Image: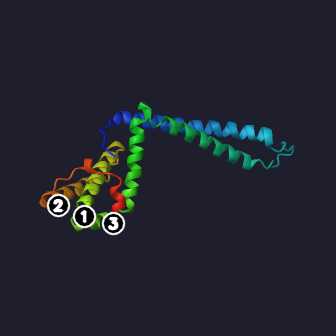
Amino acid sequence: MQLMDIDKATYRQNTNRVIMSFVASLAILALAFGALLIHFFGAPAAANGESTGNFHLNVMGVFLALAVCSAVLNSQKKKPFFQEVYYVWRLKQLHNQIYRKLAKIKQAADNNEPNAFIILSFYFVSLKQVYTLDDNTLTLSTVEQDLNQLNDKITSLGLTITPEQFDPKMLEQV
């Protein structure tokens, strides 16, 4: 995965729109599906205010709404409007994969393995990008410090390592 330059304002605006649309659609569809399911398959309303036992139909309505909203998001992920949002989402998934193997990767870097340096370089640069886009200023300085230490070590070994050399398949080899 190659790193992209992302306009922070566009990313934030599009992310907020996607989240608000998703939540609103989920709520409206869950109510609509629940009402339809109760209408066609539900127990008649009790006159004295007792429970009708239609809870399971409402839950099914929520799951149907979630499936529809997820399918719509999945079908739209390649559209230009979603480019930044989808890119950051995939980047965060990749961060999780790297984080799960981070101890092994750091150990390999201590053994001066070039692939470990490439993975760590990509990880820290992309993490810095995501933290900047998400306004996560609390941990940004730590990431910058880790990146500087890594770059110093790479320079001292005389290696030429860039984040662009990263390939997700490298994670399988660590």
Where is residue 60? Give x, y as percent.
69, 46
- Tell me which residue sits at (77%, 41%) in the image: 38
- Kindly report which numbered mark, 2 or 1, lies closer to the viewer in this rendering: 1
Alpha-carbon span between mark 2 and mark 1: 10 Å
Q: Secondary structure at mark 1?
A: helix
Give whichever of discs 2 and 1 has the lower sequence position. 1
Q: Which residue lies most toward the top here? A: 80
What residue would you read off at disc 3? 103
What residue would you read off at disc 1? 109
Q: Residues within 10 Å of mark 1 (few under 14, many from 20)?
A: many
Looking at the image, residue 82 sits to the left or right of residue 56; the answer is left
Looking at the image, residue 30 sits to the left or right of residue 36; the answer is left
Label 2–label 1 contact, CB within 8 A: yes
Question: Looking at the image, is 63 positioned above or below residue 104?
Answer: above
Say what amino acid the circle numbered 3 marks.
Ala
Question: Does residue 142 appear in the picture of this structure?
Answer: no
In the picture, the disc for residue 140 is none
Q: Secondary structure at mark 2?
A: helix
- Tell me which residue sits at (35%, 34%) in the image: 9
Quarter residue 174 falls in: bottom left
Q: Residues within 10 Å of mark 3 (few under 14, many from 20)?
A: few
Q: Is residue 121 or residue 43 the one in the foreground?
A: 121
Where is residue 90? Give x, y as percent.
41, 46
Quarter residue 121 falls in: bottom left
Where is residue 17? Give x, y as percent.
47, 34
Q: Secondary structure at mark 3?
A: helix
What residue would you read off at disc 2? 153
